[in-house]
Image (spheres, rainbow, N blue to C red):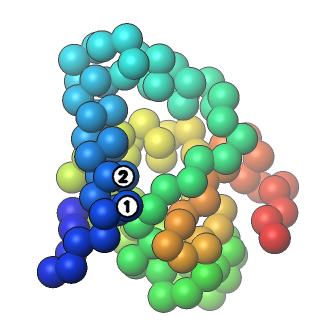
């Protein structure tokens, strides 16, 4: 959800794209099914998302406060239940470089270094 009175056009475009993709997933449309399969297979080495509002500054997994901020990040995405559940099942938040949240596959999360 947008939480500001001034609308960032890029953030709005991101949300619209997310909603379109989520709708395609709900309708079992080819684009939605393809995206879901790619996420489940962890085809992407990195997923970059907007939405770092819950993180006070750039952070890496393991930094003080990161775990709590990470929980808030995923809780905020619960409005997009299918998308949040899908992404969280296959990817971990590894780093935050405001305004972006960087996700990596769960299989790589324990060993990945991020600059």
| Mark 1 secondary-structure assignment | helix
* Pointer 2 residue: 14
Q: Nearest the camera: 110 or 101? A: 101
Q: How many marks?
A: 2
Q: Is residue 61 left or right of residue 21?
A: right
Q: Is residue 100 left or right of residue 45?
A: left
Residue 34 percent location from the top left of the image: 47, 17
Residue 62 visible in this rendered orientation of the protein: yes
Quarter containing the C terminus = bottom right
* Residue at x-position 21% and y-position 79%: 6
Q: Is residue 24 left or right of residue 105?
A: left
Q: Nearer the viewer, mark 1 or mark 2?
A: 1
* Residue at x-position 76% and y-position 46%: 108
Mark 2 residue crowding within 10 angstroms, few (<14) / some (14–19) / many (20+): some
* Pointer 1 residue: 10
| Alpha-carbon span between mark 1 and mark 2 | 6 Å
* Residue at x-position 22% and y-position 17%: 27
* Residue at x-position 28% and y-position 23%: 24
Q: Classify 6 as above or below 15.
A: below
Residue 73 percent location from the top left of the image: 40, 67
Residue 68 visible in this rendered orientation of the protein: no
- Marks 1 & 2, CB-CB < 8 Å contact: yes
Q: Nearest the camera: 6 or 39? A: 6
């Amino acid at each position: 959800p947008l939480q500001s009175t001034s609308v960032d056009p890029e953030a709005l475009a991101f949300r619209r794209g997310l909603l379109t993709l989520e709708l395609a997933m709900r309708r079992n449309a080819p684009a939605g099914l393809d995206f879901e399969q790619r996420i489940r297979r962890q085809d992407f080495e990195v997923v970059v998302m907007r939405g770092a509002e819950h993180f006070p500054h750039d952070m890496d997994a393991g930094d003080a406060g990161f775990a709590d901020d990470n929980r808030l990040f995923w809780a905020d995405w619960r409005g997009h239940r299918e998308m949040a559940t899908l992404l969280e099942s296959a990817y971990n938040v590894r780093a935050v470089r405001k305004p972006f949240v960087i996700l990596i596959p769960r299989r790589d999360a324990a060993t990945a270094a991020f600059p």
